[in-house]
Image (cartoon, helix red, strand yellow):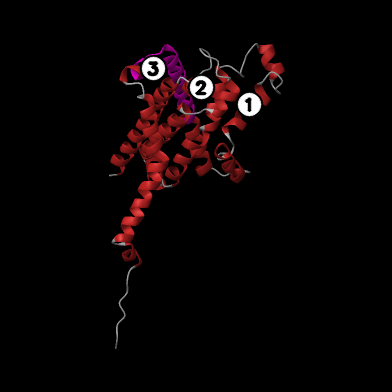
Amino acid sequence: MTTQRIVLPHKKFRGWGLRLLILAVYLYVGVLVLAPITALVNGALQNGLPSFLAALNTPEFWQSFSLSLQIALGVVVIQAILGSITAWVIVRHSFRGKALFNAVIDVPFAISPVVVGYMLLLVFGRNGMLNPVLSALDFQVAFALPGIFLATLFVSLPFMVREMIPVIQNLDRAQELAASTLGASRWTTFWRVIFPGLRTALLYGVALTMARAMGEFGAVLVIGGGVQGRTATTTMYIFHALEERQYVEAYTAAIVLGLGSVLIVSLADLLRHRTQH
């Protein structure tokens, strides 16, 4: 009786095949990520380190960066609270229209940020639906900070919710029932039993939301107008610097913004890795 040797599928990728696959992955990531970063660094340092440091110390840049940071922090606080509650309701409760509501959460992924800005103008602009009410209250949304804040809230909506939903689904309900049986209050059950399981997902959702909020451009440009000193965020500063051919200033601001976002996400990923291991 002859026996046939069985070759496992993964063994086909050993040797040169596996090396080729890894090379393709490196090229893919390198072209999309590392090449633009290298170009930014070269552009920022094209006139030497003194020009880079001078661009880094301009008051306009730090004013725009401060505005971006303030808006991002406010958005993160709201998304951390309301986004987590939204995820909890979707997972733990049944209600009419739940499937549609769950799908609506992903709308910001599908709509262009520029379109988002125009939609907000149709609602809050000079000829918008709510303009009579806003005029009566003497409250400005379009081309002001509230408009930028709403636009950033909209585009960053899915990140916290989508990060929290699978974690909430995997929570051990038996531990919650046991805590309740032992007489623990709902608040105690939440902090002692539920929250420890959500903490890592919450931190990662915060990091993704923060990075997305700091880098928003299209919606902020349309609804905010990029008025220097009022509604000019860091992305607006970069845009205006490029228009005025102040390339070193634009590249320097882009490096700071990019490194900040990468650092935030990397720290969150490190925390997640340490928690899981």
Q: Given this view, does label 1 or label 2 mark the residue nearer the observer?
A: 2
- Residue flagged by tag 2: what amino acid is it? Met
Q: Going from the N terminus, do you reach mark 3 or mark 2 first?
A: 3
Give the distance between the C-alpha atoms of the residues marked 3 and 2, in whole angstroms. Answer: 16 Å
Residue shown at 57% from the left, 28% from the top: 219
Q: Position of residue 197 (x, y in %)?
A: 37, 40
Q: Position of residue 129 (x, y in %)?
A: 71, 23
Tell me if I can see residue 185 in this picture.
Answer: no
Q: Going from the N terminus, do you reach mark 1 or mark 2 first?
A: 1
- Name the residue carrying label 1: 120
Please tell me how crowded label 2 is: few (under 14), some (14-19), or many (20+) other residues with Cα within 10 Å: many
Residue shown at 46% from the left, 24% from the top: 72
- Name the residue carrying label 2: 236
Numbered tag placed on residue 55 in the rendering: 3
Q: Given this view, does label 1 or label 3 mark the residue nearer the observer?
A: 3
Circles 3, 2 touching at the beta carbon (< 8 Å): no
Numbered tag placed on residue 147 in the rendering: none
Tell me if I can see residue 146 in this picture.
Answer: yes
> Relative to residue 93, is residue 6 drawn left or right?
left
In magenta stretch: residue 266: no
